[in-house]
Amino acid sequence: MLEAVSKSGAVALSDDVSLLETQDALRTSLSTDDAVSPPDARMLPTKKPERILWFYLAAIAAVALGGIAIALWIRTKPTGHPDPANWFNVFYVLFARNEPAGLILVLAFAALLAFWLGRGCPAFSRVWAPRPQFATVVLALLVFLLATAGSSLVFHQHALTADEHMADFQAKIFLSGKIQQEIPEFWRPMVRLIIPTHAAYDPAKHVWMSSYLPVYAALRAAFMSVGGEWLTNPLLAAVSIFALAGLTRNLWPQDRWKPVVAGTLLAVSPQFLVMSMTGYAMPAHLAFNLFWLWLYSDEKKKRFWLAPFIGVAALGLHQPFFHALFVTPFLARLVLSRRWKASAWFAAVYLIGIACWYLWWKRFFPAFSNSNSESAFGLYQRTVLVQGMYLALLAGWLAFPVPLLALLGFSQLRKLPPLLLDAAASCILTFGFYIFVRLDQAHGWGDRYFYGALGCLILIAVAGWDVLAEKIGRPAAATFVAFGAAAALFVQLPVRCFQAEDFVRPFASASAAFQSSNADVVAYEPRMAWYSADLRRNDPALEKRPIIVSFFTMKEEEATLLQKTFPRSRLISEDDLASFGLTTKRPAKAD
């Protein structure tokens, strides 16, 4: 074996070389060999891990323990339990219900990692892998297939939240050739009884539409036109893998395996996969941001000048904040670097785009400019707790290797190239912004607000991979990533999918029963069941039957009129709601 290493030209060995030097030389030779090799189960001892690894491992364990403590504490409070009298505590209920199990998995992985570090980080001498380009295609295909399967098996092709439903609501309006949908005259006096959550109604014109910006709904409409709207996010997730691979190649052109490391860390993260199974706009934000950064990362190519157009589209996906937070450090870099031509071009395109989106909201959502948005921002005691919960969500929903690698990457900020410095700033700005936002993210899987910056965090983690390789050797670092990725895919992801499916199933069952009722009108009282207000969903043109009507605020004369006009009606009782699995009883009083 020593002779083979010497002949490879990777290292030169003397006659009196020590065993330790021989192992280091062999490890170096193997790490620089790009040939595809069969698996080799032999383990190589490596250098003793540095103290900083233990420190970061303890920090990850502390975040996980803190998150578990918060979840268990919330369970002792009314806000941590489903209550039909409280429609707005889903964020706390989900955290209290799901995060102890998810964070225990993080602690278990940390314990295994500590044991591995204590043993000197033994590594496989070689790990078989396909060629990088083929690996990227496989990762993208795996992500697409898992997300597609999960949209049916986990989420039952049900848009759980109003945010998700609004995208399809507006997509249907677009497919009818309109931007706003006129409401039939009969329903205008009673529109409050039938309007879906987050739909904007204009009483002057008697029209309604989504209150969000339209780009994501337009994407859904394109797929909806062929009956495949449920494929939108799986395809966007696959695009994210390809964009991340291209971006990573631009950043590390001499290391053709970096795109595989980056793609793997993103592809097996439960937050990435589970959100890609939903109808949220977040997968579009991530895909657009990564595509933007791929264009931006190589200013020598003509495609660099296309980046601001993608950015304007990203601003208009549904809310502008996510792309704005992501892109700010990169735009600031253009100015700080005195790249005046690029700065002027990006500024001009973005300003025109921002003006267009502002006029869209002003034109189609008049309440936007009159709303009191100041109360949403400020310093509140609750936001400190919520930020701790967000941090725990990141630790619990990212693939197991990412937290340690990201910490190692952040530890080398002074040594990182400018684009990675900006990526780090993008992560910090995106996360830190919500310290000053009064409202929590409500529903979501993982830290939904951070989702658009996931690609930046993965880039920092890839930089951390180099740091880890320096400290314990490349074979050991590869072993860590491979084992952690496998554990994330086969342990972490199934747990998160089970949690999501368990939560979604009752709402999907109730919605299916509502929509399939043999009636013209289905009436129910949202206050009878927790988090059931979003079940009030109607076809934008009100042509599809049944029409879902809420009893909440219904007047006696309106009830009489509905009974007379629609004799084929169904009243959903509290027992019916309970039979779907919804929570209809208030919990026992908590201290």
Image (cartoon, rainbow, N blue to C red):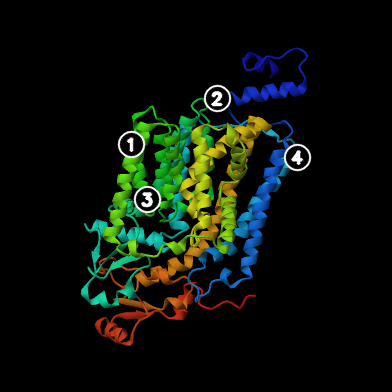
Say which residue label 3 marks: 232
Q: CA distance from mark 4 to mark 1?
A: 54 Å
Can residue 41 be seen from the camera position used here? no
Given residues 284 and 14, the one toward you in this image is 284
N-terminal of the two: label 1 or label 2?
2
Residue 345's tag is 1
- According to the picture, the residue beneath numbered tag 4 turns out to be 118
Q: Please tell me whether residue 511 is drawn above or below residue 414 in the rendered image.
A: below
- Residue 484 falls left or right of residue 213: right
Residue 400 percent across, percent down from the top left: 60, 46
| Amino acid on which disc 4 is placed | Gly
Nearest-to-viewer mark from 4 and 1: 1
Name the quadrant containing residue 340.
Answer: top left
Q: Residues within 10 Å of mark 4 (few under 14, many from 20)?
A: few
Distance between the alpha carbons at the discs numbered 1 and 2: 41 Å
Sequence order check, earlier mark of 3 and 2: 2
Residue 393 appears in view: yes
Q: Is residue 146 above or below residue 171?
A: above
Left or right: residue 182 versus residue 282 is left
Query: Which quadrant of the view contains residue 410?
Result: top right
